[in-house]
Amino acid sequence: MSMTRRPNTSPQTLRVLRLLLEEPTAWHYGYEISQRTRLKSGTLYPILIRLADQGWLETRWAEPERQGRPARHTYHLTQVGSRQASALAAKGQEAGAVQQPGAQGAIG
Amino acid sequence: MRQIQTILDRMATLAALRLLAWIGKHVDPAQQLWLDALRAELAAIDGGMARLVWAVGGLRLIWFERRRHMVNATYRYGPVLLDGLEAALFVGLTWSLIQHYGSIVVVLLELTGLSLIVAVPVLLALWRVIRTTVTRLAARDKGSEPERHVRPLLPLVFGILSLAALLVMCLCAPMALDHLMVEPGSPTAGVVVRSADHHTAEAVVDQTGSLSHSDVYLTTQVKPLAVNGVPLVRLLQPTDDLQALVNKFTGIQGYDLVQFTRPYPANIWDYADSNLNPPILLAVSWALLIAMIIVLNREARTLISQSGL
């Protein structure tokens, strides 16, 4: 009685991937992703962890924009991640489950 | 009013920081970096309550890693253990029935009834597989694939085999009994009682004197009314307490061995069976246990697969 699910095809994960795919070379902050995908931090970060573990996501610490602010963690898709996310999008697996993310700008 | 708002904001921010500090003490070292990342975002969030809500999400980092380890271990060993348990229980059930009855025919009869219990979860699993398969085919027709993919072959094969076995046993059981009944020395007519009144049956058979040893066990469910066409009462010794023996047959249900009847102590008239352990009760317990294990196994696999880990 085995059921399996393809990795990274949950609606929440697809929402994140869709957002990152919009600007594959841009680096995104966690809070920005959270706001644009309307995911809570408790949902978003496990997804980011999983994507990073699978090599779909590249992370780096960005210099603070203002003096006295902490460095922030930023994310963008790797080549593998872009290719896989594009394949998922092309297959239309997120049909009806993915909300269109907003059109707010990404960083850098 | 504005001051109160400011105070509340500060309190919420403080709570958020305290919460993140507490999480930092309990989070797996592998997730420490991610907690730092989550904490660094606090400065970009406007409003104390929003910060607190953001920090609460960090709680999931505590059990994220633990859950991943646990699910991986469960995925690796859980289903295998449950499979082994299922097989062991089934072998144990069959062996205990054979030991008790000493006749494979009666074991088949017992299993026929027990299969009805086991068949319920099997049917449920089969229905689930069919429904998922239909959904997938429908989604494929529409040009989109569903989110979850199911490999229905194995459960489908198990389900069909279970149903086929059940069907064969149901069909074969009465024929096998009929075959036994026409053999010389065997009871040519019988009744099903609502109890496994083993001792009573043995007492009756002892006085008929024409039944084989295996038939003694058979009479735990089938009590002879006649042997080779001769009514049982004629075979009994005149000195026997006929009325007492006849009374034992009160409440008969008729010749229908396929019908599964649970033991019904209330129907064991004036018979002190406190020391008896009716085999059927044992068998039902076995069957229910197997059924529960099957359901548990199925649900465990489903949960593991849905965890996405």
Image: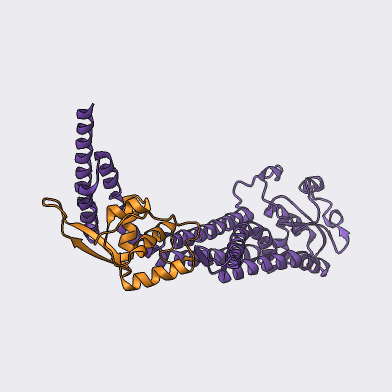
Horizontal side, residue B111 vs residue A92: left or right: right
Q: Residue A97: image x %, image y %?
A: 47, 56
Horizontal side, residue A1 vs residue A9: left or right: right
Viewer-proximal residue, B216 or B85?
A: B85
At horizontal 67% and vertical 61% (from top left) the residue drawn is B110
- Where B24 sits versus A83, above or below? above
Q: Quadrant of residue A57?
A: bottom left
- Chain ID, orange in image: A
Q: Residue B254: image x %, image y %?
A: 81, 53
Viewer-proximal residue, B52 or B162?
A: B52
- Chain ID, purple in image: B
* Furthest-left residue in this view: A67
Viewer-proximal residue, B43 or B178?
A: B43
Q: Residue B239: image x %, image y %?
A: 81, 50
At horizontal 67% and vertical 68% (from top left) the residue drawn is B165
Q: Is residue B262 among the parts visible in the rendering?
A: yes
Horizontal side, residue B226 vs residue B288: left or right: right
Q: Residue B18: image x %, image y %?
A: 19, 43
Q: Is residue B62 among the parts visible in the rendering?
A: no
- Where A20 sits versus B21, above or below? below
The colour scheme used to paint the residues is by chain
Q: Quadrant of residue A17?
A: bottom left
Quadrant the C terminus of chain A occupies = bottom left
* Furthest-top residue in this view: B1
Horizontal side, residue B200 vs residue B228: left or right: left
